[in-house]
Image: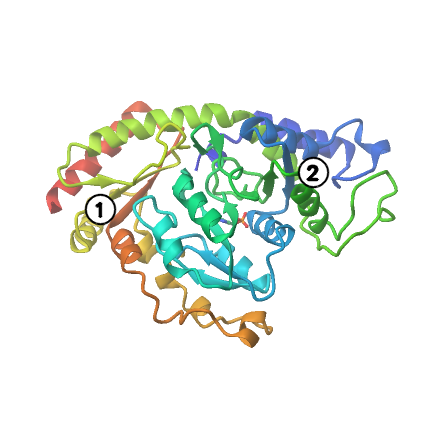
């Protein structure tokens, strides 16, 4: 959780600026703000780090996904391919946007695979909502080819992947747009916040406008600008943006230390025969927020997690059963439960969500363990943790 780990004087200073002026709103109020525009500065830092031409800060990763989908024209009745392993937000985004989720298979990249996508495409499929899981990029080359071949819009949920690059380019810049989360558990945090990025002016303008009731933000007559379409309130406030701004400035260092710590832990785990690792499509571009590895079978994985409990080795996640990130925990999603009617209730689901064929994802997920890399680990702490971990695993292998 590096974002919260490195919270300090720099974040406090940026927040104090806002407290001193009282300019809490990101637009207007020039008389109050003494030249301070935290949301704009935050966006500038995101542009600098990612190389994106455009960045727009919003209130969360979830609202970033919602504005990206709307701006890309994805809505009522459109089938959108999503992964079964993700925080649930993008799947909810598809439902709430009026679209219809189609679940495809992931593979050892932990993301949708080109074959997984291709297998579920129907004549009604409009888009792929690709989620770059656990800090690293999906197989973008393969996925772009499939999207081109089938004329699908690629949207990138980079909620967990700020700091991840693929062949020198930031995730989020391969499809029509990318959506990042800056919630409290991310590599850079605002407390709550999100950012959309794109190199495309037209989609950026739409993401900007749908996230603020359709205001074009042109001129200084707030509220009386032109409105080309509706939007909603997905705005970020100046406090959150101030924190995000300080965090983005720290990100290059955080990624550097993460990589060093992850390499150390991975090298130690390589001592254990038959442990394999997440397939990184670009090792250099990994943000190194997680070390993900596989046991040879789900039985051994279960034994290992029991052993971690007995040996008190903490900080290792079994997403398959212990976290809310895999489809086997999503009964309410499979039932399409929502307090109000949705498009999918009227149109019908494109797949039977209770009978999905996801054997590859099941295999990958049931064998996988994840360790969140900390950038504040001291050398001896890391070494002790690695010792305990390796010893514990060796007992069950
Ligand atoms: C992949 C992914 N997308 C979207 C989100 C939603 O972000 P937020 O919590 O900022 O709304 C998350 C949050 O964990 C996520 O992991």
Specify which label sits upstream in the sequence, 1 or 2. Answer: 2
Tell which tag, 1 or 2, sits nearer the viewer.
Answer: 2
- Per the image, the residue denoted by label 2 is 238
Give above or below for 195 relative to 351.
above
Residue 302 is situated, as x and y percent measured from the top left of the image, at: 20, 54
Where disc 1 sits, the SS reads: helix
Decide: marks 1, 2 in contact (CB < 8 A)? no
Query: Which colour assignment does the render follow?
Result: rainbow
Quick one: quadrant of the N terminus? top left
Real-space Cα separation, disc 1 to disc 2, in angstroms: 43 Å
Give above or below for 213 relative to 78.
above
Residue 317 is situated, as x and y percent measured from the top left of the image, at: 32, 48
Is there any visible trace of residue 99 in the rendered image? yes
Is there any visible trace of residue 11 in the rendered image? no
Residue 358 is situated, as x and y percent measured from the top left of the image, at: 31, 61
Q: Which mark is residue 308?
A: 1
Q: Residue at image x 55%, y 27%?
A: 49
Give above or below for 57 relative to 53.
below
Closer to us: 244 or 296: 296
């Amino acid at each position: 959780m590096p974002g919260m780990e490195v919270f300090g004087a720099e974040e406090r200073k940026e927040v104090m600026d806002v407290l001193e002026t009282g300019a809490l709103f990101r637009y207007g109020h020039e008389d109050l703000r003494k030249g301070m525009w935290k949301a704009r500065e935050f966006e500038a830092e995101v542009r600098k780090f990612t190389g994106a031409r455009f960045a727009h800060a919003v209130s969360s990763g979830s609202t970033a996904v919602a504005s990206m989908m709307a701006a890309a024209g994805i809505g009522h009745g459109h089938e959108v391919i999503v992964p079964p392993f993700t925080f649930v937000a993008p799947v909810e985004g598809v439902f709430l946007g009026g679209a219809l989720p189609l679940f495809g298979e992931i593979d050892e990249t932990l993301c949708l695979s080109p074959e997984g996508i291709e297998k579920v495409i129907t004549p009604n499929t409009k888009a792929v909502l690709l989620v770059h899981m656990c800090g690293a990029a999906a197989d973008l080359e393969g996925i772009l080819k499939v999207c081109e071949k089938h004329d699908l819009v690629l949207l990138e949920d980079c909620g967990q992947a700020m700091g991840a690059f693929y062949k020198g380019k930031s995730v989020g810049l391969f499809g029509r747009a990318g959506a990042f989360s800056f919630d409290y558990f991310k590599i850079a945090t605002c407390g709550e916040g999100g950012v959309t990025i794109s190199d495309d002016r037209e989609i950026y303008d739409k993401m900007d406008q749908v996230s603020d009731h359709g205001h074009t933000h042109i001129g200084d007559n707030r509220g009386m600008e032109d409105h080309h379409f509706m939007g909603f309130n997905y705005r970020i406030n100046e406090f959150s943006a101030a924190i995000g701004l300080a965090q983005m400035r720290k990100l290059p260092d955080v990624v550097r230390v993460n990589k060093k710590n992850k390499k150390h832990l991975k090298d130690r785990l390589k001592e254990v025969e038959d442990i394999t690792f997440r397939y990184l499509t670009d090792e250099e571009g990994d943000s190194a927020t997680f070390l993900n590895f596989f046991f040879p079978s789900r039985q051994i994985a279960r034994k290992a997690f029991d052993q971690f409990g007995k040996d008190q080795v903490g900080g290792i996640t079994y997403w398959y059963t212990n976290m809310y990130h895999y489809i086997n925990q999503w009964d309410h999603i499979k039932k399409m439960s929502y307090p109000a009617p949705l498009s999918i209730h009227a149109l019908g689901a494109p797949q039977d969500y209770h009978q999905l064929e996801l054997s590859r994802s099941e295999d990958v997920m049931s064998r996988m363990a994840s360790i969140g890399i900390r950038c504040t680990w001291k050398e001896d702490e890391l070494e002790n943790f690695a010792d305990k971990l390796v010893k514990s695993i060796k007992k069950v292998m």
